[in-house]
Amino acid sequence: MTGNFLSDTTALTQRSLRHIGRSPDTIITTAITPIALMLLFVYVFGGAVEAGSDNYVNYLLPGILLITVASGISYTAYRLFLDMKGGIFERFQSMPIARSAVLWAHVLTSLVANLISLVVVVLVALAMGFRSGAGVLAWLAVAGIMLLFTLALTWLAVIPGLTATSVEGASAFSYPLIFLPFISSAFVPTESMPGPVRAFAENQPATSIVDTVRGLLAQQQVGVDLWIALAWCVGLLTVAYVVARSVYHRKVR
């Protein structure tokens, strides 16, 4: 059974990746919004922002990476919705394919597509002057956190992808996730915010993840922020996975 699941998931993931390969505009579109925001904030607002950093792009990049992932997972919901409406799931169910392989193929495709988008954004940031003296272990830690965050949001995207009644509904759920980093430490320190806004900003997942990634890239001690970030990611992943699997088994019998 495990062998069938692995081989079926691999084959279906390759199918999904071929679809993306035929329409690279999906990845390009995903990266355009965060890159545009990075350009806007660095070259238009950067001089007016007091972020405690000589190079604002260094301060800004972690938040832009979160926005990149939030933009990218909307396509996961979109592709799932099209497969649901197109009868792809029912067609696969009539074949000797592991039941959960179809779902995992979409999840793994999301991870690959978002990884490519994140690399593109980092390359643009380097061209804009981003620099980091972080070592290999720090970069691996950053990659691990972003991978876990992407996996959590991807399983969250599965839910509207399976339950939405329209294309717009399938992808629109990501909008609040895209705007969440704006009310965090992604663009300015939370100390500059008024009381209620600061309280929310300091106790939502984007701030702890942004602060952890920023600290790792700046070769600083991340302390408790790392554990808070991991707790948010693992907690969100667990809840999203359980709900998504429940919805999937109810929708696809």
Image (cartoon, helix red, strand yellow):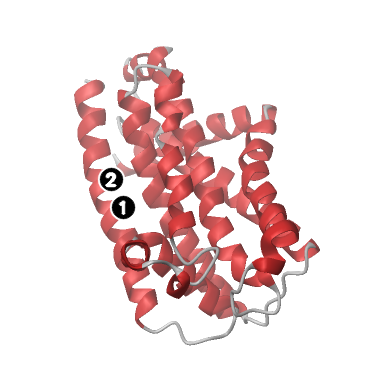
Choose between 249 and 128: the one closer to the eye: 128
The crowding category of the residue bearing disc 1, from other C-alpha atoms within 10 Å (few below 14, some 14 to 19, many at least 20), is many
Relative to 89, residue 171 above or below: below
Q: Residue at x 53, y 51 (%)?
A: 67
* Mark number, residue 240: 2
Question: Which residue does the image show at 58% across and 57% down from the upper left?
Answer: 64
Please tell me whether mark 2 sits on a helix, a strand or a loop. Answer: helix
- Crowd band around label 2 with a 10 angstrom C-alpha radius: few (<14), some (14–19), many (20+): many
Where the N terminus falls, by quadrant?
top left
Q: Position of residue 72 (x, y in %)?
A: 53, 42
Q: Position of residue 191 (x, y in %)?
A: 44, 75
Nearer-the-camera pick, 169 or 250: 169
Determine the image quadrant of residue 131.
bottom right
Percent position of residue 25, x then y: 69, 32
Q: Is residue 123 at all visible to an observer of this figure?
A: no
**Amino acid type of the residue tagged 2 in the rendering:** Ala
Mark pair 1, 2: CA separation? 5 Å
Lateral position of residue 129 relative to residue 27, left or right? right
Residue 128: image location, x then y, percent: 78, 63
Q: Which residue is mark 1?
A: 237
Marks 1,2: beta carbons within 8 A:
yes
What residue type is disc 1 on?
Leu
